Image: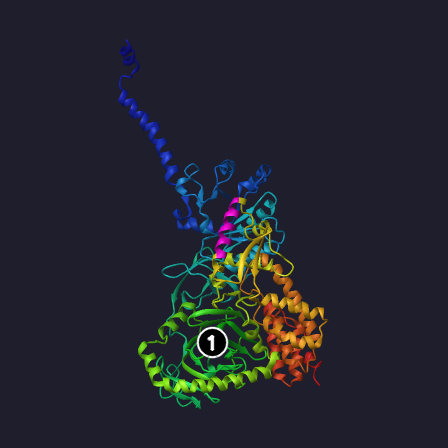
Amino acid sequence: MYHYIFYICLPRHPFKILNKLISYYLIPSFIVLFVHMGFAQNYNSLSQEQQLELRLRSHLYLQPKNIQKSTLKNILSANVPIAIEYETKKDWSFIQKISKHCTNLVIISKKNSDSLYVLDPSFIYIHPKQIQNINLDSTYAVASKKNHFHSVKPFGAISYKKNSSVSDSLLYSIWNNSGKLPNFISADSSTLKKTVHFVKLFNSTEKIFGVVKTKQHLLENVAFKNFEHRKANGLFSFPRKTTENQSIGLIPYKAGYYFSPDIIFTTDENSNNQKEFNAFPLSPTFGLTDHFEYDKTLNNSVRNMGDEIVLNNIKIVPDSAHKSVGYFNKRAYIDTGISSRTALKSSFTITAWIKPTQRGNANSILGKGDNFVLKITNGYLTFTMAGIKDYISRSSEITLNEWTHIALVHSEINNDLQFYINGQQTDRVDLIANYETTNYNLLIGSNLWEEFFIGYMGPIKIWERELNKNEIKNQFKNKSPKKSFFNQASLAIGFIVLCIGLFYFFKTRLSNKTKRQQKKQGLNDSTTLKPLLENNFKEKIFCFGSLQIINSKDIDIAPNLSPKLKQLFLVIFLHSLGEKNGISTKKLTSLLWPGMSAQSAKNTRGTNIQNLRSVLSSCTEISVDFKHKLWSINMSENCYCDYLLANNLFKQITENNYNVSLLNTKLPILVTILNQGRLLNSSNASWLDPYIEKFSHNLIEQCFNYIENLAIKENGKLILSIIDVIYLYDDLNENALRIKMQIFIQQGKLSFAKTTYDNFVKLYQKLYKETYTTSFEDIISEYQL
């Protein structure tokens, strides 16, 4: 019976029915499932047109955990593109609610896009690694280089929370200067209205967009000649102001490259086209104007100078590294002739092999009139513009009796100098006034002040363009001195007997002479102060200029710190000085990892502190400690710190009411420290700004107090050094300008006073876009005798 019932229940054509079920139900269901699983759209899978559309669009960026339910209605009524962070399954319900009313929804998630099949396949998925973030949560957010997008990542994101200082102009400046639209602007319930305004503003702004690239990759840090601050990193977009000329010329520039095309004008007709600039590396000889080499005489293999070159007391001697080199001694120098007057205009690069044998206060390598001097100042590579500034690179030390490859690069477009030692960049400084060439002959081994070089010089090259880091490195590698065993043995055997005898003879005389000179100079010679201050300590921390942490082996370990580790070191360090005993874990986290969950912050903080301790492990006098619930940097008595010493000197001088005798003994020490550079010059962080601003304000105020208590006639040189300190923090300080001009006038150096004034006026015009109203005559009339 059971068999009979079962038979009756079956259809007459069971396989036909089954086929229909599969065709009409199962296959469509499988297709839907397949679409969900296999075709989740990520950025890389989009067409080029879709990618471009996405990059040119700004979004309201929401993190579900920061959005209150009551805000949902306002979000949906905002009518702007929306991006949502997807971290956990809890976020899915929020995404579902938004997706019902929003098309083109963007999901930002670390999850693999193929694993997001549970979401709507029409969503576009972007991984956080494709986004560069700028955090403006601090109330000290300002439009500066450190708050610009600087990577080739396709998208930019901005977080600002409740920072009321964030405005249209700030975000617009970030976009305008770094070539990347803020694609994702974070909002919570309290900032929703403001963020919606930003998004609508950016999406309604006309854009210029394009790409800068080589054959192999996107190109970073490309400038545009007719836009002072604009930079592009691969894919770029800039706002096209309605007030701008309808034809906007884009002229890309990057050291070491030429572009095709080299200019594109953006018009109404082509404004919707992507502008493509293809970059090609320049030949090493492109722009080479001079190549000086020694043979029987000095030759310039690029510029035919004939008999123009004049050698004064130069001895050409054989050398194992460079075949023939020039030996400079007893006021020896080379005048390279009238043709050299056209050298060193606008952007330039100089490379040279030098081997100094003696060190004075100043030893000139190259000199050209009063606006160009490349020299060694107390062992450090220096560029001098007379009456303006000595740009002393404390990180570019020149060793005696060794061949050193030096390079100096001037970038007209960036208005800066870059120093290189043996193929590695050691420093970069901004010029306080524009460089302008002078119509004088180029001198090798001397300058207008007769600061003669003593030692050996090898090949010298000059380009009328800016070489990049790789080109400088290749120049060093292509002709590095080769130290073979044979050469060393030959030299040793040839001179060993003579050297042993002369060594002890001259060592005794030189030692006695040096001691007499040091005793005579005393501490009033600021050139001797720095080594005298530092040499008594086993380890050192330098905060003026670039951060340096010198361990007991005399190795700077600061370059081993990542940007985040450097911030970690500095925030603990600054909270460990004076009356401060350290920083709490809570405050440390709020400064360095704002907005991070407690568990994530704990893990990240622990890893970073462990890494910091690892880097500092080579130091015996510096350590990271955690005591009484406070993090601190502990320095023993054998650790020198210039920032700590400077603050102690500030306090000591102030407490003694600027006593003149104390000023005469302590001020040279303080000025020597301060003139090493701006406080933590290469460190950028929003939390650091208040420290720098407070220090700058107090410093300038104290400097004028010192000047007020010093007689200009007797202390002119010291006061000029104080003014150099002021200019490090305030390029356009009018009181400093007047005092500097007063000193030059009283010294009878009217031309120096005029140069100082002219450079001030140029810088004033450049920064403020207006003319300085006080004339040169008005100022000098106050001080002329």
Q: Is residue 258 left or right of residue 740?
A: left
Asked whether the viewer can see residue 335, the reply is no
Quarter that holds the C terminus: bottom right
Badge 1 density bin: few <14, some 14–19, many ≥20, Cα 10 Å? many
- Closest to the observer: 51 or 290? 290
Where's residue 305, x and y in %? 40, 86
Residue identified by numbered label 1: 398
Residue 468, position in %: x, y? 43, 69
User: Foreground residue, 693 or 744?
Assistant: 693
Is 606 within the magenta?
yes
Give the colour scheme shown.
rainbow
Say left or right for 175 vs 163: left
Say if 708 sits above or below 496 in the image: above
In the image, residue 20 sits, relative to residue 327, either above or below, namely: above
Quarter of image, res 117:
top left
What residue span does the magenta drawing correspond to? 599-613
